[in-house]
Image (tube, rainbow, N blue to C red):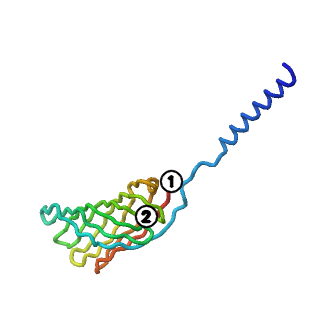
């Protein structure tokens, strides 16, 4: 083998090794750091009662279409589908639902699908619960988040959120 061919072969092997090392040591894409925020919401869109039924000392209520406006870290409009169980003996209400929203999260637009759950007082309407983002579309497809949610006696709602974006 000639000296020039040997140098060319050695240089090619070295180049291939360097590319392999650079590729193997490249930093993997990472999720963004968790960010905290919060805001409020109203219940300005009337809901439609789909079903009311009795089960022993409980009343099960299914409502759809209600929702309202969100402001703060998550801004936009939301519509929900909720099933509540009113425990007549205690006055406690167990709430489970989902809502879809056309929103902007920290300046990024898209649609999110959220699950929420909690308890309320049947007399005062005070609600406390938790929520989690199940999925998103558009630029929010890689959004993950969760937080607390509440409604006070006046019907004004608030929320906290901790969120991040996956790569």
Position above or below: 138 against 58: above
Residue 148 at x, y = what percent? 39, 68
Kindly identify the residue that appears in the image at 47 percent across and 61 percent down. 108
Using the image, tell me which numbered label, if any, was put on residue 104.
2
Kindly report the distance in space between the C-alpha atoms of the residues bearing marks 1 and 2: 17 Å
Determine the secondary structure under disc 1.
loop
Q: Residues within 10 Å of mark 1 (few under 14, many from 20)?
A: few
The answer to whether the residues at label 1 and label 2 have Cβ atoms under 8 Å apart is no
The numbered mark, 1 or 2, whose residue comes first in the sequence reads 2
In which image quadrant can residue 118 be found?
bottom left
Residue 150 at x, y = what percent? 34, 72
In which image quadrant can residue 14 be found?
top right
Using the image, tell me which numbered label, if any, was put on residue 166.
1
Kindly identify the residue that appears in the image at 19 percent across and 65 percent down. 48
Residue 72 at x, y = what percent? 43, 72
Residue 73 at x, y = what percent? 45, 69
Q: Residues within 10 Å of mark 2 (few under 14, many from 20)?
A: many
Q: Nearer the viewer, residue 129 or 14?
A: 14
């Amino acid at each position: 083998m000639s000296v020039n061919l040997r140098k060319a072969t050695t240089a090619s092997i070295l180049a291939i090794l360097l590319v392999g090392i650079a590729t193997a040591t490249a930093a993997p894409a990472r999720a963004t750091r968790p960010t905290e925020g919060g805001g409020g919401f109203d219940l300005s869109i009337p809901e439609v009662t789909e079903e009311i039924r009795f089960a022993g000392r409980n009343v099960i209520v299914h409502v759809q279409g209600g929702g309202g406006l969100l402001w703060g870290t998550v801004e936009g409009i939301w519509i929900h589908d909720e099933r509540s169980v009113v425990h007549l003996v205690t006055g406690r209400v167990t709430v489970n639902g989902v809502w879809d929203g056309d929103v902007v999260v920290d300046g990024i637009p898209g649609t999110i699908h959220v699950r929420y759950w909690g308890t309320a007082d049947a007399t005062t309407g005070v609600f406390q619960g938790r929520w989690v983002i199940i999925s998103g579309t558009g630029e929010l497809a890689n959004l993950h988040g969760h937080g607390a949610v509440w409604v006070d006696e006046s019907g004004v709602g608030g929320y906290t959120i901790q969120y991040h974006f996956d790569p």
